[in-house]
Amino acid sequence: MRDDQTFLYLNAADIAAIDLDPNEAREAVLEAFRAHHEKRIIAKPKLTLEIGPGHSFQTLCSAWEESGFAANKWLGMAPASPSSELPGIHAVIALNDFASGRLVGLLDGNVITAVRTAAMSAAAAQYLALPTSRTLGLIGCGLQARFHIAAMKAVLPGLSEIRAYSRTRRSAEALVQEAQESGWNGTVSDDAETAIRNSDVIVTTVPMSSGLAPFLDPAWLAPGSFLSAVDIARSWQPHDLRRLEILVTDDHAQQHESPPISPELGRIGSFDADLAELASQAKPGRADNEQRAMFIFRGVGLADLAVAARVFAAAEAKSIGQRLIR
C-alpha cells in the first residue's frame, strides 16, 4: 500500500516508550520560540469553547516549514474529583506534512502535553531561576508534577530536595516516594505556605474545580525564587502578582486573547517578557539574585508541534507505533 494512504498512530504507551530526553524537549521548545520571534512559525492563539468552570474544549494550531510539519491539538477538559483516577484532560495531536498537507501522524496528546508543558517551564527556568537552586516545591502532585521533576532536574542539576503539597496527602506521599527512588530527598508539607517559603523553584499545578478560590500568597515567595504557574495562576491571589519583580508569559498575543488573570495582567505589555523574547535574547532574564520571577503561561500550539515532531521522528527511527489506513 502506498505510504501516502497511511499515517502513524502513537498511543500513550508508544510515546512513553520513546522517553524523550528532557534536555532535548527543552531545546526543541526553545528553538520553536526563537523561530516564532523571528516570524518563521505561524501560530494562532488557542480557540476555546467554554462550557463551565474547568470544562472546555480547545484547539491549538501551528505550522513550521523548517520542521516540515504543521500540527493541531484538540482537547477536552472537564473537572475531575480528587479521588478520581481519570485525567481531567483528553487530547490528541494531528501532525501534517507541511508541503503536501497530508496527515502523517496522530499522537496521544496527554503525554505530549505533559512533556511540552514541563519543557516550557524548564525553558523559562533556564533564564529565570538561579543556577544554585537546590529545593523544588510542588503544589499539586499529579501527572504534570511528575514530568516537571525530570525537566527541572535536567536544567538545574543542583536540585536535590522536593517539598510536596497536595489537597490529598496520599498523592503527595506517593510523589515523594517516587522521587526518593530516583535519588531525591523529599518531604510532604502539611501546608502550601511552608512548601513555598522553603523552596528555590516552585511549580503549581492545581487543577480547576468548581468553587476553587485562590489560596496561595505571592508574598510567600522567597527572594531569588522562580515559580512556574502551570495552573495559569488560578491558585494564586491575583492582587499582588504584579508586585513580583519579573513576570513572564509564553506568548503576549496568546495572553492578550485569553481571559485576564487580573486587572493588571492580560493586555499587551502587562508582562515583562514572553518566552520567545527570552529565547531570542530580545529581553533579559534575571538581573540579580534577589528578584522573584514568575512564569504564567497558557500553552501555545508551537510548543506542541516542536515536541510532537521530535517524538514522531524518534518513533519512525525506532519503528514504534502502528500504521493505520486513512
Image (cartoon, helix red, strand yellow):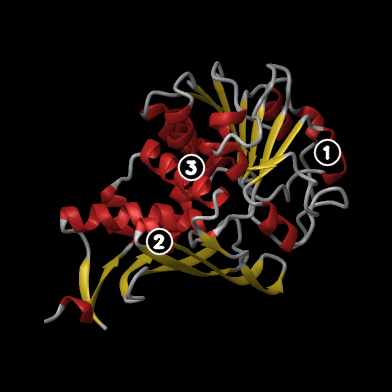
Residue 27 in the figure: left or right of residue 265: left
Q: Which residue is mark 3?
A: 30
Q: Which residue is mark 1?
A: 242
Q: Which residue is found at the position 42% from the left and 66% from the top?
A: 70
Q: CA distance from mark 3 to mark 2?
A: 16 Å
- Label 1, secondary structure: give it: helix
- Label 3, secondary structure: give it: helix
Quarter-wise, where is residue 10 in the image?
bottom left
Amino acid under label 3?
Leu
Contact check, label 3 and label 1, Cβ < 8 Å: no
Residue 315 in the figure: left or right of residue 219: left
Q: Nearer the viewer, mark 1 or mark 2?
A: 2
Contact check, label 1 and label 2, Cβ < 8 Å: no
- Label 2, secondary structure: give it: helix
Percent position (x, y) of residue 176? Answer: 48, 32
Q: CA distance from mark 3 to mark 1?
A: 25 Å
- Neighbour class for label 1 at 10 Å: few (<14), some, many (≥20)? some
Q: Which residue is found at the position 59% from the left and 63% from the top?
A: 80
Q: Nearer the viewer, mark 3 or mark 1?
A: 3
Q: Which residue is found at the position 63% from the left and 30% from the top?
A: 189
